[in-house]
Image: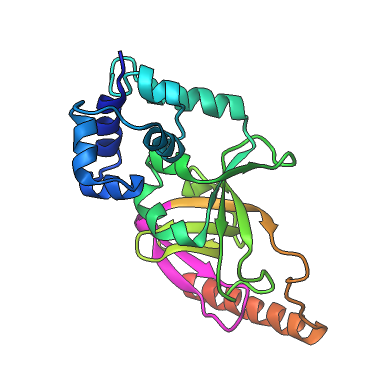
């Protein structure tokens, strides 16, 4: 017995897509997708292969497994097995083009499974994710760098002046140094390494995820170089910023 039609309908609804939207992804007509879902027609091999690429499923799984079986919870078990087999060093990459979607899908296993992954053997055991950054606010870290971050489970884990990827509902994905406001616990202060950018505050309750920077990956020969005077000015400006923040807090 083939579960192809049932699985197509289940996976489409799991992703929250209309028949029209899903048909466009598969490059077929909506009416044909409807025929597949209602089991009035058998899906073509190329359609099943496209679905396999989208959902990271094999043809056998699409055809022979009832993915909608909540008692068996096949997809959840499969994901757990995949993560276990991959080990602790598998890192999902969030490129700039996926940043907007990440705010909506960061807690959705299906969305995370669609991200490209890579492994880095030098990482200690932990939960990691990588984010591509743009802009010059964190120079000398150049625009286009990829920041590999380790998951921060609680704001209590924050260490003053360390760098973090901060995901918040209002600011989106940003890479900054973070200070906890000891006077107002519901505020975080985000500081850029480039002194041209002023520190600013975000509401702690607005933050949905934080990742402590573990590695910075950038293209060869693109690292921004600063001379001694620039570095001296940077250190002075950072000291002044920290001193001003301390005075405000106290």
Residue found at the very far bottom of the displayed protein: 229
Q: Position of residue 3 (x, y in %)?
A: 30, 20
Q: How is the image coloured?
A: rainbow
Q: Nearer the viewer, residue 216 or 222?
A: 222
* Relative vertical location of residue 160 with respect to residue 214 in this rendering, above or below: below
Q: Position of residue 101 (x, y in %)?
A: 38, 55
Residue 182 showing in the rendered view: no
Question: Which residue is located at x 59 percent, y 76 percent?
Answer: 136
* Residue 175 within the magenta-colored segment of the rendering: no
* Relative vertical location of residue 226 with respect to residue 36 in this rendering, above or below: below
Q: Nearer the viewer, residue 206 or 144?
A: 144
Could you say which quadrant of the image residue 26 lies in? top left
Residue span colored magenta: 186-208
Question: Which residue is located at x 28 percent, y 19 percent?
Answer: 69
Q: Position of residue 186 (x, y in %)?
A: 38, 58
Q: Nearer the viewer, residue 36 or 111?
A: 36
* Residue 198 within the magenta-colored segment of the rendering: yes
Residue 14 showing in the rendered view: yes
Left or right position of 201 against 71:
right
* Relative vertical location of residue 205 with respect to residue 53 in this rendering, above or below: below
Q: How many marks?
A: 0
Could you say which quadrant of the image residue 147 lies in? bottom right
Left or right position of 225 against 202:
right
Question: Which residue is located at x 69 percent, y 58 percent?
Answer: 217
Left or right position of 193 against 62:
right
Q: Nearer the viewer, residue 121 or 210?
A: 121
Q: Position of residue 244 (x, y in %)?
A: 55, 78
Could you say which quadrant of the image residue 66 lies in? top left
Residue found at the very far top of the displayed protein: 1
């Amino acid at each position: 017995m083939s579960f192809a039609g049932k699985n197509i309908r289940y996976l489409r609804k799991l992703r929250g897509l209309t028949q029209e939207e899903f048909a466009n992804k598969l490059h077929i007509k909506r009416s044909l997708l409807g025929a597949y879902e209602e089991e009035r027609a058998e899906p073509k091999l190329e359609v099943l292969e496209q679905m396999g690429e989208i959902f990271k499923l094999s043809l056998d799984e699409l055809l022979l497994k009832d993915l909608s079986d909540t008692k068996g919870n096949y997809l959840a078990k499969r994901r757990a097995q995949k993560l276990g087999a991959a080990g602790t060093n598998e890192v999902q990459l969030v490129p700039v083009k996926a940043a907007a979607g990440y705010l909506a899908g960061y807690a959705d296993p299906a969305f995370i499974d669609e991200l490209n992954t890579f492994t880095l053997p030098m990482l200690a055991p932990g939960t990691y994710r990588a984010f591509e950054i743009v802009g010059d606010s964190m120079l000398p870290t150049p625009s286009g760098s990829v920041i590999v971050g380790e998951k921060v489970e609680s704001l209590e884990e924050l260490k003053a002046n360390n760098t973090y990827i901060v995901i918040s509902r209002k600011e989106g994905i940003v890479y900054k140094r973070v200070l906890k406001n000891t006077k107002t616990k519901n505020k975080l202060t985000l500081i850029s390494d480039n002194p041209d950018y002023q520190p600013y505050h975000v509401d702690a309750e607005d933050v949905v995820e934080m990742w402590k920077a573990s590695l910075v990956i950038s293209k060869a020969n693109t690292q921004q170089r600063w001379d001694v005077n620039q570095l001296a000015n940077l250190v002075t400006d950072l000291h002044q910023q920290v001193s001003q923040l301390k005075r405000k807090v106290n």
